[in-house]
Amino acid sequence: MAPKTIPATAAIPEAVVRTMVVCVSDALSPVLNGSRNLERHLGVSGTCCPRYWASPALRPWQHHRLIDLRKTGPGPRYCAGGPIGLLDLAGMRHGAYVGASVRHALWAGVVAGTKAATPWPAFLQKHLSDPSAYPMAAAAAEFHRQPRVQAMRMHNATIRGAGHLDLAELEMFQAGASAYASYHALWALCTDAFVTETGDRMQPASAFFADRITYLDQAARYLDSLDASQRLVAITVHHP
């Protein structure tokens, strides 16, 4: 059952920022090797996140220019950041697109025959608008009762690890295979938030997919405008 229409003045569910990208200066990059330094220099409570692919053309004498460079087995070297020219952003984008395309095909099979479902942010918004009349438990129960959500939960109950379908991505899944894959291709580079050279922060205005699209469009355009020498660092944000 879909939640009732939400008034225009209703509370808006915020997008959760778990990972962010920060533009840093050449002088600052070498000291970003611990959570204490991130807090002191960037004002961010978190840790560096090795998620970038290093360029396959990387030379040994360039290793020191990357933050937390590591090799985790077959495939690309990972690092938490460095100059854009030494990162394989194109490879990351392509890999994320392909992986998301496979995941969407899996999802389509899992939910075949079920009706489109109302995404979680709509239920959360209704709860935030009147918590006493619509408790969080009621919102969660109503969301989980939808056949499409039940199909995804049943699938997840039978597997561990790879193949898990994130219920938070229901709205993205339902937008179609191309939209879902493109979303992940851009998210791989821009993550949940992006801090510019001047310290301005970009992030989605809400948890709804439409606002995530707006953010990713802006962040990707900004990323494309940066010089190859600009240093980036990916950070996993610590929440209280």
Image: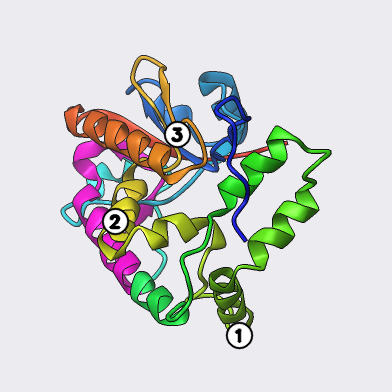
Callout 3: 10 Å neighbours few (<14), some, many (20+)?
many
Q: Position of residue 48 (x, y in %)?
A: 50, 41
In contact (CB < 8 Å): disc 1 and disc 3 = no
Residue type of the residue flagged with mark 1: Thr
Disc ID at residue 158: 1
Q: Residue at x 70, y 36 (%)?
A: 128
Disc ID at residue 179: 2
Residue carrying label 3: 204
Q: Secondary structure at mark 2?
A: helix
* Mark in the foreground, 1 or 2: 2
Is 160 or 175 nearer to us in this picture? Answer: 175
In contact (CB < 8 Å): disc 1 and disc 2 = no
Q: Position of residue 234 (x, y in %)?
A: 43, 40
Callout 2: 10 Å neighbours few (<14), some, many (20+)?
some
Per the rendered image, the range of residues in magenta is 74-102
Asked whether 172 falls inside the magenta stretch, the response is no
Residue type of the residue flagged with mark 3: Pro
The first of marks 3 and 2 along the sequence is 2
Q: Secondary structure at mark 3?
A: loop
Q: Residue at x 57, y 40 (%)?
A: 16
User: Residue 29 appears in which quarter of the rendering?
Assistant: top left
